[in-house]
Each structure stands twice: as C-alpha cells, then as structure tokens.
Amino acid sequence: MVISVREIIDGGAREPALNAISRFSCRDKDVESFLKNKALEFERRDKARTYLIYDGNKSALLGYFTLSLKALPFTENTSKNTIKSIDGFSKDIRAVGIILIGQFGKDTELAKDIDGGHLLDICIETVYAAQKIVGGRFVLLECQEIDKIVSFYERNGFKALQYDENDKYLQMVRRL
C-alpha cells in the first residue's frame, strides 16, 4: 500500500504515520534522516513528494521514496550521443529537466518483508504516472558508488551517466 506524505498532511492519519516514520530504520543514515527530519517540510514547501510503502495491513512502514524535478547539468565528459538521447532533440544542450528519485530506502528491520526490486517497481510506477502528466524521457537517481548498490540499480534498468558536480555521487538514468 502506497500513501503520499501529502495525504498524511491533508488527511486524518497523521499520528499513525508519524509513529511509523519515527520507527523507520535504514542502513543509509542519510536516507533515514531525510524521512524523519525533512520529508514533511519538503512536502509543505512543494520541493518534493514522498511516498510511504506499507505492508498490506498498513501496520508496518516497509520503505519509502521521494520524487522531485531536477535540472540535470551535463558534464564535459558526457558524450553528445548520450545528451541527445536524454534530451530527445539536441546534442548541444548543457542541461535537461528530469524526474529525480531523491530518496529511496527500506526499513532495515523489515527488509525481508519486501524485495528492493519490488519497492523500486512501485517507485517507477509513480514516476510513470508523473511522466504521463508532465512528460520526460528519463528518470535520474544519485547514489554512492558501492558495487552492491550500483549492481542493484543496473539490474533494474539504470545506467551510469556521470558524477554530480561535486563528484560525490554517481548519477544513474533509466529510460522511461
């Protein structure tokens, strides 16, 4: 079951959701911290949309993801063919608007209850819904270059594109 944080802010299920969020634990402490400390504010300020994935009984928060829009600047090392493929028109542009999976994680304690691939499928379904409304050719995510993480995303259709401006994260894209 997928519930947006926007529904929680606007609706009456605020306390149970906030309790579930407070219990959420993730190996990636940045991902955990975002959900606990920033997701509601990002939602209120319309900076991003966060979606919570519950088990069928809505008793356990299995994972979550956050989507937003991003201006993706291309680095000098990005090939002209890749730029044209992502943009759809020009090989000479310097940046493109893209849907960003900004946060993506599952609860460490409940990891066995949902496959990461299934969680990503739920996320991508939501990306497709956004694409249907606003357009777009690719989805972007940024991750640490850890073999296990990169391999997971590659198995799920993402390809390495470039490093972010600070060379901190590997930027990976998937054709929609």
Image (spheres, rainbow, N blue to C red):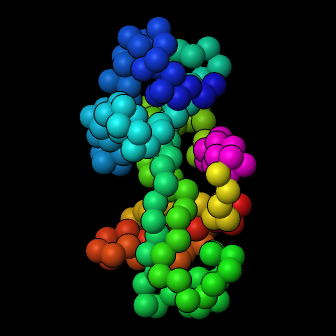
Q: Residue at x 47, y 82 (%)?
A: 94
Residue 100 x, y percent position in the rendering: 50, 56
22 relative position to 9: left or right: left
Query: Of residues 162 and 98, which is closer to you in this image?
Result: 98
Q: Is residue 50 above or below residue 30?
A: above
Residue 129 forms part of the magenta stretch: yes
At a point 31% along the width and 34% down the height, the residue shown is: 41
**Residue 143: quarter of image:** bottom left
| Horizontal side of residue 36 vs 119, given as left or right | left
Vertical relation: 130 (above or below) 140? above
Magenta span = 120-133
Image quadrant occupied by the N terminus: top right
Viewer-closest of 65 and 81: 81
Give the prevailing secondary structure in the magenta stretch.
helix
**Residue pictured at 67% horizontal, 65% vertical:** 137
On screen, residue 48 above or below 85: above
Check the image and report above or below for 88 versus 173. below
Residue 175 shown left or right of residue 68 in the figure: right
Q: Position of residue 86 (x, y in %)?
A: 63, 75
Q: Say if residue 133 shows up in the picture.
A: yes
Q: The C terminus is located in which quarter? A: bottom right
Q: Position of residue 125 (x, y in %)?
A: 69, 44
